[in-house]
Amino acid sequence: MINHHMGGVDMARACTQQSEVKPEKKLAQGMAEAQQSEIQLMTDMLRERGAAPRQ
């Protein structure tokens, strides 16, 4: 799931860089931030269990 979320971050960042529509850019920025937060949560959960995300 972490790799899946990382793909979402990449796509949202691309939208923020390429879009000229302010609401679209704001939405994409929020999506990138949410995905990063979820990545951090999943990484923390793995560490608590003595594991690490796949590289």
Image: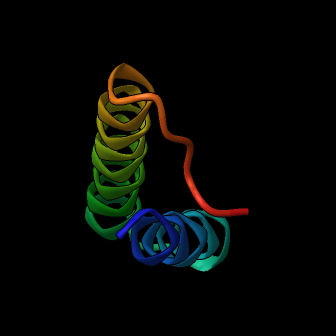
- Vertical relation: 55 (above or below) 43: below
Residue 46 position by quadrant: top left
Residue 48 locus on image (x, y percent): 34, 21
Residue 36 locus on image (x, y percent): 43, 43
Q: Quadrant of the C terminus?
A: bottom right
Residue nearest the observer in this picture, 52 or 5: 52
Q: Which residue occupies the extreme right position in the image? A: 55
Q: Quadrant of the N terminus?
A: bottom left
Q: Which residue occupies the extreme top position in the image? A: 48
Q: Which residue occupies the extreme front position in the image? A: 50
Residue 29 locus on image (x, y percent): 40, 50
Q: How many marks?
A: 0
Query: In the rendered view, does 44 fall on the left or right side of 20?
Result: left
- Vertical relation: 19 (above or below) 41: below
Query: In the rendered view, does 17 fall on the left or right side of 45?
Result: right
Residue 7 locus on image (x, y percent): 53, 77
Colouring scheme applied when the structure was drawn: rainbow
Image point (37%, 62%), residue name: 28
Query: In the rendered view, does 37 fall on the left or right side of 12?
Result: left
Residue nearest the observer in this picture, 1 or 51: 51
Image point (33%, 29%), residue name: 49
Image point (52%, 72%), residue name: 3
Query: In the rendered view, does 18 fall on the left or right side of 48?
Result: right
Residue nearest the observer in this picture, 11 or 42: 42
Image point (40%, 67%), residue name: 5
